[in-house]
Amino acid sequence: MGITNKITTQEKKDFVKTWALLIKTGNPINETLEILSKQIRSPIFKETLRKAKERTEKGTPIHQVFEENPHFEKAFASFIRAGEESGSLSKTLQHLIDWLERKNNLEKDISSATLYPKIIIIFAFLLGGGLTFFVLPKLTPIFASLGINLPLVSRILLSSSQFIQNNGVVVVIGFLFFILFIYLLSKIKKIRDSFDYFVLKIPVVGELVSLYQLTIISQLISTLFESGLMVTEIIDITIESTSNKAYKDSLEEVKEKIIKGDPFSRALSVYPDLYPSIYISIITTGEETGSFTESFKYLADFFSSAITEKTKKIPVVLEPIILIFIGLFVAFVASAIILPIYQVTQGLY
């Protein structure tokens, strides 16, 4: 972790677990932060806790310290605030641990599912780079000495190789500028918001994004309700923690409808494209039976399992596509090298 600028969910979970234990034993908050800062290896986390200790000693509430720190989600600080205000911080930290555990498991599932495609794609780039800079430059003078009219695939491959070698700096700079351009575009709110709506319509990808958003929303709402926060406050925190603009907008409308007196399920039913019928049905049942929080717990587990199943299938779906792409690339390179040799051997007979 020390080499990155991020505090991982696993690190946050371990921190809160130890914090909850120290609180149970009666340690003051400043002493607790001092102990925790010595145990944590991450330099950025150590610095965060050091500053937190300084601010709490001056009277700043601990939840405000985390709320103003960009490395921590609003939900993280809200759990702590709920515990401080209710006088049951130890209990609330247990809810926070549960949420971080679910969040961490979800991140691990997605990361493990995309690991294989990442490795294959990196390998393909290394293969292409190796051929371009090490193999093809040695073949160019050989083909030139053969004195034959090279096949089209050979001319394309050699021309591409020579262009990259002669203009390598320009290619690299152009690629970096392209990445920078995409990054700057992503910072434009209108473009980012439009993309959030568009991505939900992409087959497979849109379904995964939707499942992820429903899982995050369900996990947060179920856990925050147990922390004793108001419904509108819970929705505000969920809006902040939801990454897709379409779901953010829908929750804003849901909050307004709830303020006017609509049940949660009826407010959500206005968005059938975002919240499937099973989602609405289970929440409706929870409202009618008085098991509202349990309904969201069930939904969190259900959609989390659905993501796990979907992400497990990603390598199965992508593997043949990636292998076909690599196979075609290798076939192209092989034919570009072998065909001129074949022409020469044919001319010997």
Image (spheres, helix red, strand yellow):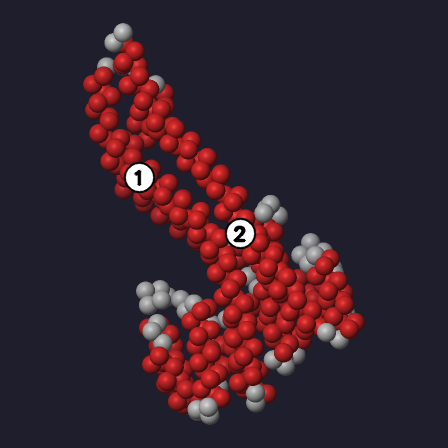
Q: Residue at x 49, y 39 (%)?
A: 320
Q: Position of residue 326 (x, y in %)?
A: 41, 36
Considering every residue shown, the one lying at the far top of the view is 349
Check disc 1 and give the amino acid type: Gly
Cα distance in 3D space between marks 1 and 2: 30 Å
Q: Is residue 284 above or below residue 227?
A: above
Check disc 2 and give the amino acid type: Lys
Residue 200 in sight: no
Q: Is residue 288 above or below residue 337?
A: below
Residue 302 in sight: yes
Q: Quadrant of residue 277?
A: bottom right
Secondary structure at badge 2 equals: helix
Lower sequence index among marks 1 and 2: 1
Residue at image mark 1: 129
Residue at image mark 2: 312
Q: Is residue 269 above or below residue 170?
A: below
Q: Quadrant of residue 214?
A: bottom right
Considering every residue shown, the one lying at the far right of the view is 288
Q: State the mark number for residue 252.
A: none
171 displayed left or right of 52: left
Q: Position of residue 215 (x, y in %)?
A: 60, 62
